[in-house]
Amino acid sequence: MGKRRVILSLLLFLIAALLPAAALAAPPAEGPVSYVVQRGDTLGTIARQYGVDYRAIAQANNLANPDLIIPGQRLTIPAPGTVAVRAASHSGLTGRLVFQLASGGPIYTVNADGTNLRHIADGLDPSWSPDGKRIAYANWVSPGGIYVAGADGSYSWRVFDWPSAKTPAWSPDGKAIVFTRQIGPTHGDIEKCFSFFGRSFCMTSGPDARWRLGLIEADTWKFRDLLSWDHSFSPTWMPDNQTIVYDSDKGLHKTARDDSFGAPDVHLPYVNSVTLDTHDMDPRVSPDGTHIAVTYRQHDHLEIHVINADGSGRRRLTFGDGLGVAKPANNAAPVWSPDGKQIAFVSDRDGRWRFYIMNADGSNQRPLFAGTEVDALPLQYGFANERVMDWTGK
């Protein structure tokens, strides 16, 4: 019996010497913990012992090569069950975004790689100035109006006093801000008549809220109305600093900064039109002025379309209503990257609203801020043509 005990002791000693230290370590109840690499360890054996994805350990320790660890190296082991996430800082995206969590809610700025999240104001429809130094936004809380703040939120002042204004947008030269404001409702009932097989039928409806475009000259802060339809929303600038495209009640139309064109004509709606499709909303012109991205009412939900600047060549980029889908997903509020190669947007395809990004042709759709604190924020979209975000390369 004594001889057998000696042999058994020797076998146990040899097994302990041959097995990596990580295989003998007791897994912690909680993490993260610190671990010193032993001879024979691999990131895989350490990860299995602690119940952690080896890529999560690599990310936690900034290991460029997960296959290269050395004895004596101290590693931070994340909590059991931790898995790796796609690091936004590896996305290669540059510039900064400004976004709202909800209309009238917090407004944040963040680097395109998901870092340096900062709360700068509360309001709706934020827009970068061309030099990236200022942010325009609307506020409906008294005193309401159009506000301008520094990019870091260090100051804010009201440049136009109005209780119901939306979607301010800086001109490319930074010398003007265009926006829409409610100037209705009209007073009293409105009579509307229709012809049907040679007979006329008339009906009355309640007051009609009108929204018109207005412009502030940044040098003087003087305001003037622009030529536009009675229901004009979401203005966006062409690179020429003169032409403004907006969502009208007849489709997408153009107006001019100097009023040289843009007068609406109910009998000739195609004049100054880009499209006559009333499902087009929230146009955003590409940086080079060749394309326009829109939120499109696709039957019972929203999708992203792109058209040429003249209204031709329509392409649908998102598909939230695939076969077998019980409830179509919504994709809305597109914005171009500064180089025009990407389009960011919001989507509820994951069961909640998140920021997404895709190539300008619609390929490679993926979450924009996965694995960052931005992705945990309670983003909302209210289906009210809100301009959720803007992107600057400055």
Image (cartoon, helix red, strand yellow):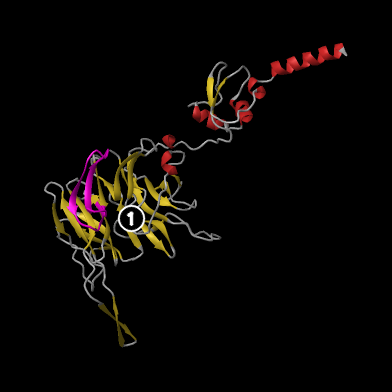
Position of residue 207 measured from the top left corner of the image (x, y, whole percent): 26, 72
**Residue 160 in magenta stretch:** yes
Q: Is residue 339 visible?
A: no
The foreground one among 260 and 30 is 30
The foreground one among 264 and 215 is 215
Q: Residue at x 26, y 62 (%)?
A: 232
- The residue to which callout 1 is attached is 386
Q: Is residue 2 visible?
A: yes
Quarter of the image containing the N terminus? top right
Position of residue 375 measured from the top left corner of the image (x, y, whole percent): 44, 43
Q: Residue at x 55, y 30 (%)?
A: 31
Segment tinted magenta in the rendering: 139-168
**Residue 236 in magenta stretch:** no
Position of residue 142 measured from the top left corner of the image (x, y, whole percent): 24, 53
Question: For numbered disc 1, what is the local secondary structure?
Answer: loop
Position of residue 235 measured from the top left corner of the image (x, y, whole percent): 26, 56
**Number of numbered callouts drawn:** 1
* Lateral position of residue 243 relative to residue 275, left or right: left
| Label 1, residues with CA under 10 Å away: few <14, some 14-19, many ≥20 | many
Amino acid type at mark 1: Glu
